[in-house]
Amino acid sequence: MPNVIVFDIDTLRTDHLGCAGYFRDTSPTIDRLAREGVFFPDMHASGVATGPGQTSMITGLAPISHHFYLTPYNLPNLIDFDDDIPTLAEMVQDVVGGMTTATFDNLINFKSHMDQFVRGYEYYVNCSRTAQPVHHHLVGGDLNKRLVPWIAAHADESFFLWVHYWDPHTPYNQPDAYRDLWPTPRGDHASLPHKRAGAGYHYVPGWGAEGQLWDPPDEPDANTIELYDGEIRYTDDLIAQVLGEVERHDLTQETVVVVTSDHGEQLGQHGTYGHAMLHEAVVQVPLIFWGPGILPAGRVVPGFAQHADIAPTILDILGADPAQLPRFDGESLLPAMRGEAILREEMLIEGGTWRALVRDGYKFIRGHLADVPELYDLANDPMEIVNLADVAPESCASMRRDLAQRVRQALGDQPDPLFSQLAHEVQAWDLALGRVWPSLTWQVPSQRGQ
């Protein structure tokens, strides 16, 4: 069976990669993998942000099934993961068998420890070398100092390896050589390539619509898209280093490489720089499978893939017996890679208090706190600027009903975990702040499919 290396690149949005048409040379190694392997350009998150998305990757389940909606980085004892749900590494150990499992990651450092990211690994290598919640400060070069020697030491074994790079998550802490690759004067948007959307506005691909482009504050440590792109190029070079080590040990023809991400980044779009809400800037993430002599080569697969497809696909590649696997929300993408199946044309995306339904070129987003619906024509409005909810009320109502139906089907007779975890988070925050609000049991935990 082949080795598997998963490069899980935090906060990487697809449209900042050359293989997706980005105008900067941010990703030569990833672009090569996409060219030589199988690229899924319509890959989307099952859930955001890091906690839900990564949990979907390793369980094959959507958040509505695995119930992990939060990313508890700063509050202890906030939530726990269901021990009865097997993780990908556990299934590699117990269903596939015969593989050394290892991960280079520090998600266990979150204040509310997410133990699902440790389970199933013979080697859990916390490259932060601390128990403190400084997860996103880990620099990829420090991770590679641990990773590259590990590959050399285990080159004669069959291994499953999960590599979680925090770059390009903030803070932007890449080496100096990657901080000024594309020097652009602050606020100079005229030098960037502009396109015209069918909806009538002009925009910069990967940045946003004119008039809403990120203009960082005049501060030494301000976040800039140039720094974000430099972090991507830095991570790309780290991947090249790892692949060079694989080649040095003659493992290229025996190794499947997966490149993906948990979520993207708004980069100033929709009024925020981070990864809130469910717009394409946040939920469209890369997915590439590369395996010379093992997987098809040079294929671009249309249709929607999601986080929940990653685990069943890897297990399929490894020859796992389907009869020994649990139920997945996702599906193996291997038949689609071979041209034997087509991917889904509709998808449910979740994150925070939002849910979205995407189909027929339209996206409907509903927030469950401030219920202000959003409806976008993605083909003509790629930056999701023109909310059609008021001008197309019938379409909006139809997609709202269908979203509710999808949720009801997934829940059955169970309460909606989105609301119960939200209430849990708010109560935990109040306890952390020395307040107790008993009224925050609300009525929302009893809602189903609304």
Image (spheres, rainbow, N blue to C red):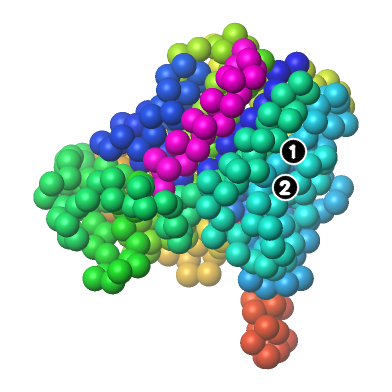
Q: What secondary structure is found at the residue carrying circle 1?
A: strand
**In the image shown, does 429 or 419 lie closer to the viewer?**
429
Main secondary-structure element of the magenta-colored stretch? helix
Q: On the image, which quarter does residue 270 sit in?
A: bottom left
Q: Which residue is mark 1?
A: 102
Q: Nearer the viewer, residue 199 or 288?
A: 288
Q: Is residue 249 in view from this perspective?
A: yes
Q: Amino acid at mark 1?
A: Ala
Q: Which residues are magenta?
A: 231-253
Q: Which residue sits at x=28%, y=71%?
A: 219
Residue 292: name its quadrant: top right
Amino acid at the residue labelled 2: Val
In the rendered image, the vertical position of residue 95 relative to residue 176, given as above or below: above
Q: Which residue is mark 2?
A: 125
What separation in Å lies between label 2 and label 1 (alpha carbons)?
8 Å
Residue name at image x 43 percent, y 23 percent: 32
Magenta stretch holds residue 338: no
The answer to whether residue 350 is left or right of residue 176 is right
Residue 226: percent from left, percent from top:
30, 51
Neighbourhood count class around disc 2 (C-alpha, 10 Å): few under 14, some 14–19, many 20 upward: some
Do tag 2 and tag 1 residues touch (Cβ < 8 Å)? Answer: yes
